[in-house]
Each structure stands twice: as C-alpha cells, then as structure tokens.
Amino acid sequence: MSSDHIAQTRSPEELERLADAAGRELEDAPALDVLRWAADTFGARFCVTSSMEDAVVAHLASRAFPGVDVVFLDTGYHFPETIGTRDAVAAVLDVNVITLTPRQTVAEQDAEHGPKLHDRDPDLCCALRKVQPLEEGLRAYDAWATGLRRDESPTRAGTPVVGWDAKRRKVKIAPIARWTQQDVDTYVAEHGVLTNPLLMDGYSSVGCAPCTRRILAGEDTRAGRWAGRGKTECGLHI
Ligand code: SF4
C-alpha cells in the first residue's frame, strides 16, 4: 500500500503521548502483538524499515499487517546480495517494498565531494546517502519499525520496544528489541524467512560494501561495520 495520500491526523504531541504509553504497556509484549498494535493504531501511516540483512521484521509485519510498506534505503553502495534479498522479499512476502534513494548518485557525489567519501568522511557520506533520504521518506508516516535488538551492541542495549523518535517526531518501534540472536535464528528456521546470503559467509551485520567486513571470533555482531574508523552507527538510530 502507498501512504502518500494518507494525511497526518495526529499532532507530534499526541504521537509522543502515544509512544510513552505504549512503551510502558508493550515492553514485554510479543513482537507480533507490538506490530498488530502499530497496524491498528497507525494504519497506512506505519511502515517497517529494513536493511535487508534478513526479513524477520518484514515477515512479522506482513503477518500483522498484510501489504505493509517496507522501506529500504538503496545507498548505491550495497552488496549485490542485499539488492537480491530486497527483490526476493518483494516477490515472496505480502508487503509493499519501497526503495528510497539519495538525492545524488554515487557518481554525482564523487564529482561534488571527491571519490570514496566513505573513507574520508563516513559521517557525511551516511548523512547524504542514509539519513537524509530516510528523513524525506518517513514524512509519509507517523510510526516506523526497525529490526534493532539490544543484544547487537552496547550502543543498542537501551533500545525501547516502543519509543519516541524526537529527531523525526515519530513513534519508533523495535518489535524484536528483546530478542536474542538465538530467537532470530529460531524464527528464521521455523518460518523459512529470507536472509541475506552474506550471513552465511562470515558477515554478521550487513551494510554498505565499502564499510562492512566479516567479523572475527569473539567480536560483537556489529564489529564489522566501519571497522577501525571509530564509527558504530550510521545516524539513522541516534
Ligand atoms: S555505510 Fe559507508 S558507504 Fe554507506 S552511506 Fe555510510 S559511509 Fe557511505
């Protein structure tokens, strides 16, 4: 479904109150119940974002809200496997995949900022290729869900199941925030959920190709992202 034509009816203040109350009520709720609440409460002004590392939240959301919008950011730097996972999700699940793109192609960005901005200023590269397009894409929604989990890294340990995204003034939902990697693996196995093939090839977190490497034994799951650059998040979740 496309939400372009669905006008916003709740003020940011109402949305923040909703987020606070739901955050308390749904902290211990199963992921599917959290997504059903989001579907009932926000309808077409709710979407799921997916990095196409796996399709767990998209799969859960399709059960709670068939036809739900699944938003994917195509930075222009993805592995082919990630684009393939997106296309497979669109073909297999009852969801509406929406691909957001940056204002500039990689070639246009190279022309303006020089090549390999990701090596010289990854914060600017992420701002241009991830943060800005997501902010523009999320204008059509009051609430968005992500696949953030508390066990992924110390920076994500405090992720609320339902919280207030003060930066974007939207309700932000992390239905699997309390899940462990084992919970994810079990759900994938039980439901035959699509996963990015790179997860079987030494990667435990999949982002843009220039900024992602395989992890080493004992590293946390996001250690392969911007390794050695003192950066842990792209700016979408801070
Ligand atoms: S993850 Fe790397 S390539 Fe992707 S937008 Fe950020 S800096 Fe650029």
Image (tube, rainbow, N blue to C red):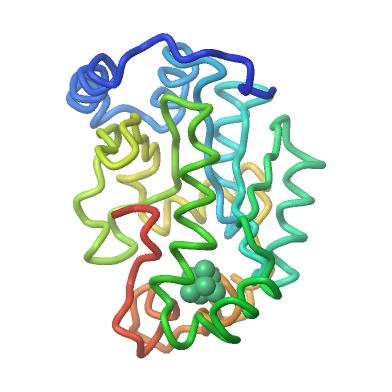
Q: Left or right of 78: which side holds 169?
A: left
Residue 150 horizontal/vertical position (percent): 28, 54
Q: Is residue 204 visible?
A: no
- The spot of residue 116 in percent (x, y) is 57, 86
Please say if 135 is above or below 22. below
Q: Is residue 11 visible?
A: yes
Q: Quadrant of residue 175?
A: top left
Quadrant position of the N terminus in the picture:
top right
Q: Residue at x 42, y 24 (%)?
A: 142
Quarter of the image holding residue 176?
top left
User: Would residue 28 be found to the left or right of residue 76 on screen?
Assistant: left
At 25% from the left edge and 33% from the top edge, which residue is drawn? Answer: 164
Q: Looking at the picture, how far across and down is residue 127, in whole percent?
A: 44, 62
Q: Quadrant of the C terminus?
A: bottom left
User: Count the marks: how many?
Assistant: 0
Q: Position of residue 4 (x, y in %)?
A: 63, 23
- Residue lying at the far right of the rendered structure: 91
Which residue occupies the foreground of this view, 182 or 214? 214
| Residue at 50% in and 62% down | 128
> Is 46 left or right of 105, judged from the image as shown?
left
As drawn, 231 above or below 237: below
